[in-house]
Image (cartoon, grey):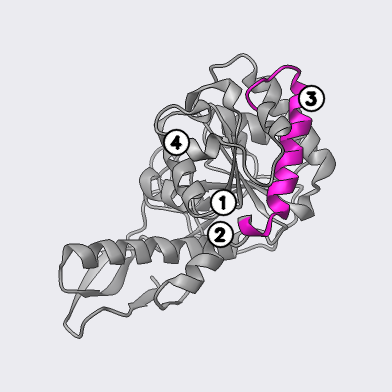
Amino acid sequence: PAPLINVSPPSDELISLEADGTTLLGRIGDRSPARARAPEKVEEAKGSQGSLEAPRARTKLQLPLAKESDEVRLAQMEIDSLCRAVTEQLPHTGGNICVLGGCEIHHPETRPLIQAVAKRLVETLPDRDVSVLTGGLPGVQEQMVKSLSSHGFQQITNLVHFGQERGSAAIGEDLVAGVDAAERRKVFSRVGDVYLCFEGGPGVAEEAQVAFSRGARVVPLMGLGGAAGGDFGFPLQALEVPTWCSSEDWARLSDLGNAEEVADVVVRLLHKALQDPRSRGGNARKIADNSPDVVVTGPMCLVCGP
């Protein structure tokens, strides 16, 4: 059964209509056997190719009479509700590091740098201290989860959308976080504490912009080019030296040099970003404080997206 979402409208004049269950989340499962998680009942709608299909369940929404401003407000409330539901299902750790990057790796230094960062990250931040989130995509994100897993790191969650082919080398746990890629991107850019960016195109730039504008820390590997280098509308302020970082460390993100040395700097910045109180609680906790009351009742499934 679909959950009932009660939305407090701006007026007494209401209409009742059915909408797709965009706030339904369904846990797909843990693809890392070594990771101990409590079993949960899941329902998967399998298509002919074995991919997930959007649920047929309909969600009853109480909507205000159609006005453009009301429609925008309602859409934002739905995304906020979805972000809260996703955040509740994420592992409770010291912070969430989101990996942003292109589906193809172009710069010759990207792969060895990802491998070096993953190795150093595992050495300094055990599973219990941090979670790594991806969109379950090939390229940068797949390389990162492969590298983390090879060093024994298990706290990996892939946020995917309905119908998405399971990516990220079948490593980690998948959570559906949207009915399509666009909705999944909105959620992904709102649930992380720190965003680590390698290369990327317009999608990466858009997610970084949303994350940066809400106060999350963004660490771009500028020397790799692409969105992380300032292209495709990447937020220019996110390229400037932040107050929580030294100018020397920040400069190393542009001057790559030795991968091991740069990885040391990157992980040091991730440590500082996670310790900065202004980077914490920028997702569902902030949403919960600022959003109108939305009550979700009934069983809930979780889905993950890219």
Callout 3: SS: helix
Q: Residue drawn 70% across and 20% down?
A: 112
Q: Amino acid at mark 1?
A: Ala
Callout 1: SS: loop
Q: Residue drawn 36% across and 66% down?
A: 77
Q: Amino acid at mark 4?
A: Ala
Q: Residue drawn 50% across and 73% down?
A: 289
Residue of label 2 = 282
Magenta residues? 253-278
Q: How many residues crowd around disc 2 within 10 Å: few (fewer than 14), some, or many (20 or more)? A: many
Toward which corner of the image does residue 88 lie, by quadrant?
A: bottom right
**Are dots 1 and 2 in contact, CB under 8 Å?**
yes
- Kindly tell me whether residue 155 is visible in this rendering: no
For the residues marked 1 and 3, what is the alpha-carbon distance in whole angstroms? Answer: 25 Å
Q: Amino acid at mark 2?
A: Gly
For the residues marked 4 and 3, what is the alpha-carbon distance in whole angstroms? Answer: 26 Å
Q: Which mark is residue 261?
A: 3
> Is 159 positioned to the left or the right of 54 in the image?
right
**Are dots 1 and 3 in contact, CB under 8 Å?**
no
Residue of label 4 = 205
Residue of label 1 = 216
> Is 35 positioned to the left or the right of 82 in the image?
right
Q: Position of residue 40 (x, y in %)?
A: 61, 64
